[in-house]
Image (spheres, rainbow, N blue to C red):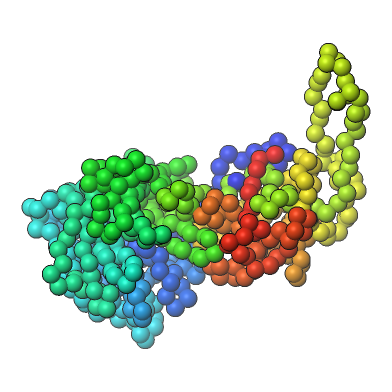
Amino acid sequence: MKHTVLAALGLCFAAAPAAAQLAGEPFIHDPSTITLSDGKYYTFGTRGGGLVSDDCWTWHSGGERPGGGVAPDVIRIGDRFYVAYAVGGGGMNGGHASLVKVMWTRTLDPKSPAFGYHDVGVVASSDGVEGADAIDPAFLLADGRLWLSYGTYFGAIRMVELDPKTGGRLAGNQPVDVAIDMEATALLFRDGWYYLLGTHGTCCDGPNSSYNIRVGRSRTPTGPFVDHLGVPLLKGGGKLVVAGHGRHYGAGHFGLLDLGDGVEKMSMHYEADMDRSGRSVLAIEPLLWRDGWPVGGENLVAGTYEVQSERGGALQLAVDDTRIAFDARASFRAKPDAPVGPIANQTLAQDMASWPKGPTAVDLGDYMIRPHQQWTIAPAPGGGGAFGAPYYSIVIAGTSRALAVAGDDVVTVPAFTGAPEQLWRIDQLIDGTYRIAPKGAGGASPARALVAIGRSTAALVRFDPASPTGRWSFQRP
């Protein structure tokens, strides 16, 4: 462990229910970067062992790594998986003397004949007296060079360079101090910037833990790293990326999960999940980018929404509008001193009187606050999920009429049954909008997603991250 380590016609949900959390037994502390090996996803934690998942939603104990120790990290380079971990330090047993070791294996699946760890050796150390503590290692491979950050609140965060061919320390390379007042670091490279993410605050005290993840950036991997206000990380700076929220306290130990097509997720642990006895748990949440900085996003919260295409047009039942009774003389022809008062919105009963009874197509239209344009969205009970987000039901508010896949078409069916063709992935994109894809679209990057074809047609086609046609926003009615 580490040192001091989206209202159904008036009905509104204030927070996502427990079904929006990862399933299984996601209990871990100090999770390593989630890594894909032989079709499964692995993360490792303090004290050895880790978690394994088929879909990054349901997690169970699995995976093996020898050596014990604390706060490992994993990176794949070529046909090898390198694992770095620390032995000693962290203030445990009163000391800060520690070793960062590296080993490698050709697979993370212990059942594979290619499984087996090979020791590389010590790549960083601290003697317990110097102003550094050699724990919490993190890898970054960028421009063909391999870097490792490490350290805690006890002294400085340091950076060393490793050999990407062997995982060992480059001969003659000396550690460089790059930050203070943080631990559990992680590294990113994007658009010519090196980002150093570190955890501030306190840990290991359940709901009393104040862990939060902050970031600085530099044009070089050895710094100087500064935050968005220009404060150097060597003077305690750091822009907030994510902190505790809702019933999850103490966000720490960042990891990047890049799904491609403009979808990035971040893994971490929360020191306390208040719905799981305050235990430390793995979490996977959207990662956004704003003005060149990483920012924590959020999975869509249960509620009723206008589903608006970034191309223009709101998702709706393909039915004729039912007019709201209205006398034009009460509007622009009225005298200035004529009395005014509220007009009620169209009711669901008024709108649905002309709806077909069976499956009905959907299209896009100008949003006019009609009931057939309002969708209640919620994690589907028992529906599972993928890559940190639940599968959702999408139904016309106040009804059970559900959005569903019918071959290559998108329709609504009279009743939500929980069938796979009625379940939807809603992943937040790095710009804050969302991608909507059917459950069966497949993989980290779905083969098909809901896309606006012109301003009036919604269809399931290949998602293009460079186009606004597949981006959606969710607005409260």
**Residue situated in front as seen by the camera: 204 or 323:** 323
Does 42 sit left or right of 100 as displayed?
A: right
Query: On the picture, is 154 further left or further right than 455?
Result: left
Establish if 390 lies above or below 291. Answer: below
What residue do we see at 36% from left, 73% from top? 76
In the rendered view, does 119 fall on the left or right side of 331?
A: left
Q: Quadrant of residue 62?
A: bottom left
Q: Nearer the viewer, residue 416 or 350?
A: 350
Can residue 154 be seen by looking at this rendering? yes
Q: Residue at x 23, y 70 (%)?
A: 162
Q: Whole-percent x and y of residue 116?
A: 30, 81
**Which residue occupies 83% across, 16% down?**
336
> How many circles with numbers are drawn on the protein?
0
The quadrant of the picture occupied by the C terminus is: top right
Quadrant for the N terminus, please. Answer: bottom left
Instruction: From the top left corner, tell me how far across and down residue 36 is, in percent.
Output: 43, 72
Is residue 384 at all visible to an observer of this figure? no
Residue lying furthest top = 337
Provide residue 92's location: percent of width, then percent of height: 17, 53
Determine the residue located farthest toward the bottom in the rendered image: 113
318 vs 236: above or below: below
Residue 135 in the image, given as x and y percentages of width and height:
21, 58
Residue at image position (65%, 43%) is 475
Q: Is residue 465 left or right of residue 22?
A: right
| Nearer-the-camera pick, 150 or 221 | 221
For residue 174, above or below residue 106: above
